[in-house]
């Protein structure tokens, strides 16, 4: 038996056979055809038809929304325009593989050129192309493998298109040889509560069918264990699974200290799923996603309709924290800020952009106040990317003027965290956005892959800033929430509570794991975990220091 | 050749799902159907061709059908284009 080690995500222990995700196919060479156009065309006909049939069969099995997407993919494989493009290339001497590759690439560029929603469909077209070429070359199709029995998926890294097709019933855990704790795979794993181990070097050498024990709490993968180890692992896995399935209820520590668990939402459509997962309210409602496609600012009545629907989902005084429009580097809003900037993350974004076009902010606050007056939900409104006390004062005064009862700010910039004692004198509450706080603290653009390793909220510098805000909140009796990827990491969630967070907000699917983890620790233990993490010199050290305090 | 001008009703234009519904109907018609926007014509049975026109909500397009039963095919396809499939 050998052991591989990576970075674990989650706290599960699973046992199962490995299934490798085939790598993407190399580009077919431009060698001339040796069998002539007619034979190449026959091959194309066969491969396209078989691919379309295969995709339709998967669609029928999947049903629902997935079937619609797959049917559109089957239509792409059947497409007459594409076919005549392929035939022209074959007539000019290309092999079937090369002609298919080039023809699909041409349409792919066209889709990307159309932008927006259509550009996202380019990945669907890529997937079809890969399947056709795989069939022509007689190799397995790339993408998530299919199996009737549950398996441990092993891949180099997962692309968004792959993860959309993951059958969560069948994938016990995901193991990748690349990608870090903030890779797409890691984010997906946290969001969907799939145990994952990323950055596990050597994982690609595992053969299909090899049985492994994957422990996502330690990041260890034990390869080909003996019977005794297997039965011990199965028992331990069942014990952890039972712990994770604590009944839905209010978030609390082992000693009864209440830690409300709230949901991050981008649309009122997600309300039912959030309530079902046990969300006690909403800790971050991202209003910008309602309007990303808009070319002009949304009107008061359009916005009011959305907010009213949202608040109806949380009757009886439940808390709903709405963030006003946050135009940013990762989500530009053309009607707010259209000017190209060298450093968008440091530019006219968040509250700065709203202030530059104050009418948009006034309209939004007016719409929110109207929705508030017709609902008994407890509406809190906060401003994004506040970096000074003066900005805090400005926003809170404007919100009050327009009828908002509870107005606060997001702490995403180190300056606000360092001056939290003064910021919280003005604001009713603070909510820490850990993703941006990490990017600004470590001066690493979170959209830039080459500096992705810096984007880790376990970094003690980030934790120290959280402590500043927690202390200020405690001294002034003001709530300090966390909304951001960090709150969805169960152990980090405990650390954040130890640093003074009074509520946690996350994607609804993460609520169960976090609720279960909180129940394992008393307030005193949470503080001890936080102290241990603060004492480390980097993110990995903080994680290890906190884990070292956990009972075995 | 029988022809008709139609204003597209789908909220998000003729993309993805509405385009799939439309091309499937055009393919079933059994006669060649052309879809034209701003002078550019494509085979209406080709989902990639239809998508490449970048048709948005409210755009004006022309349908041309050749062959037997052209008027009936035009009626059906016009009906699809004037339905909001995103609603």
Image (spheres, coloured by chain):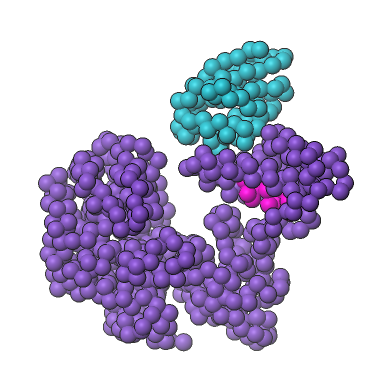
Q: In screen coordinates, is B26 left or right of A498?
A: right
Residue A237 showing in the rendered view: no
Q: In screen coordinates, is A32 left or right of A452?
A: right
Q: Position of residue A56 (x, y in %)?
A: 68, 44
Q: Quadrant of the N terminus of chain B?
A: top right
Specify the quadrant of the image occupied by residue B80. top right
Specify the quadrant of the image occupied by residue B3. top right
Q: Is residue A421 magenta?
A: no
Q: Position of residue A395 (x, y in %)?
A: 17, 52
The colour of chain A is: purple
**Residue at (20%, 58%) from the top-left corner?**
A408
**Residue at (57%, 75%) from the top-left corner?**
A200
Which segment is the magenta one? A125-135
Q: Nearer the viewer, residue B84 or B61?
A: B61
Q: Position of residue A415 (x, y in %)?
A: 22, 67
Q: Position of residue A83 (x, y in %)?
A: 72, 37
Q: Nearer the viewer, residue A141 or A336?
A: A336
Chain letter tied to cyan: B
Q: Is residue A129 magenta?
A: yes
Please, what is the dominant secondary structure of the magenta stretch? helix
């Amino acid at each position: 038996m050998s052991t591989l080690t990576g970075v674990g995500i989650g706290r599960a222990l699973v046992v199962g056979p490995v299934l490798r995700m085939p790598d993407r196919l190399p580009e077919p060479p431009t060698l001339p055809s040796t069998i002539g156009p007619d034979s190449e065309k026959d091959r194309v006909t066969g491969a396209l038809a078989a691919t379309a049939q295969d995709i339709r069969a998967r669609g029928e099995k999947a049903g629902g929304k997935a079937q619609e997407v797959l049917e559109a993919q089957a239509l792409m494989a059947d497409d007459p325009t594409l076919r005549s493009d392929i035939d022209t290339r074959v007539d000019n001497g290309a092999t079937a593989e090369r002609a298919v590759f080039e023809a699909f690439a041409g349409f792919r560029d066209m889709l990307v050129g159309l932008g927006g929603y259509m550009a996202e469909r380019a990945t669907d077209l890529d997937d079809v192309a890969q399947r056709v070429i795989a069939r022509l070359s007689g190799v397995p199709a790339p993408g998530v493998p299919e199996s009737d029995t549950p398996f441990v998926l092993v891949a180099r890294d997962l692309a968004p298109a792959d993860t959309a097709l993951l059958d969560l019933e069948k994938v016990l855990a995901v193991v990748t040889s690349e990608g870090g704790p903030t890779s797409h795979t890691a984010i997906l794993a946290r969001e969907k509560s799939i145990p994952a181990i990323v950055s596990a070097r050597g994982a690609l050498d595992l053969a299909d069918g090899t049985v492994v024990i994957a422990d996502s709490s330690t990041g260890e993968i034990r390869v080909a264990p003996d019977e005794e180890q297997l039965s011990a692992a199965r028992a331990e896995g069942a014990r952890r699974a039972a712990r994770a399935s604590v009944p839905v209820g209010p978030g609390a520590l082992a000693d009864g200290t209440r830690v409300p668990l709230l949901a991050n939402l981008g649309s009122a459509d997600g309300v039912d799923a959030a309530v079902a997962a046990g969300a006690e309210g909403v800790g971050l409602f991202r209003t910008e996603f309602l309007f990303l496609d808009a070319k002009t600012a949304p009107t008061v009545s359009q916005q009011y309709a959305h907010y009213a629907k949202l608040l109806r989902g949380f009757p009886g005084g439940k808390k709903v924290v709405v963030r006003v429009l946050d135009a940013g580097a990762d989500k530009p809003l053309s009607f707010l800020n259209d000017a190209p900037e060298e450093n968008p993350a440091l530019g006219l974004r968040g509250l700065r952009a709203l202030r530059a076009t104050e009418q948009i902010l006034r309209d939004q606050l007016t719409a929110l106040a109207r929705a508030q007056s017709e609902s008994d939900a407890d509406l809190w409104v906060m401003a994004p990317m506040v970096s000074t006390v003066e900005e805090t004062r400005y926003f809170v005064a404007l919100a009050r003027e327009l009828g908002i009862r509870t107005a606060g700010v997001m702490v995403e910039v180190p300056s606000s965290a360092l001056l939290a004692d003064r910021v919280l004198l003005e604001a009713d509450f603070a909510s820490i956005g850990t993703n941006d706080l990490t990017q600004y603290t470590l001066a690493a653009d979170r959209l830039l892959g080459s500096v992705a390793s810096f984007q880790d909220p376990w970094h003690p510098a980030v934790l120290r800033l959280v402590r500043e805000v927690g202390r200020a909140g405690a001294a002034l009796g003001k709530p300090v929430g966390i909304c951001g990827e960090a709150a969805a990491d169960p152990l980090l969630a405990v650390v954040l509570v130890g640093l003074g967070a009074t509520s946690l907000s996350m994607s609804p699917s993460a609520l169960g794991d976090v609720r279960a983890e909180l129940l394992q620790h008393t307030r005193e233990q949470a503080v001890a975990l936080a102290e241990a993490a603060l004492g480390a010199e980097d993110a990995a050290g903080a994680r290890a220091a906190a884990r070292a305090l956990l009972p075995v | 050749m029988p022809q008709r001008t139609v204003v597209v009703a789908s909220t998000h234009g003729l993309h993805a799902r509405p385009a799939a519904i439309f091309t499937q109907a055009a393919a079933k018609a059994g006669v060649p159907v052309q879809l034209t926007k701003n002078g550019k014509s494509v085979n209406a049975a080709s989902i990639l061709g239809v998508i490449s026109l970048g048709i948005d909500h409210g755009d004006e397009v022309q349908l041309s059908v050749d062959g037997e039963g052209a008027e009936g095919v035009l009626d059906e396809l016009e009906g699809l284009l004037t339905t909001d499939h995103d609603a």
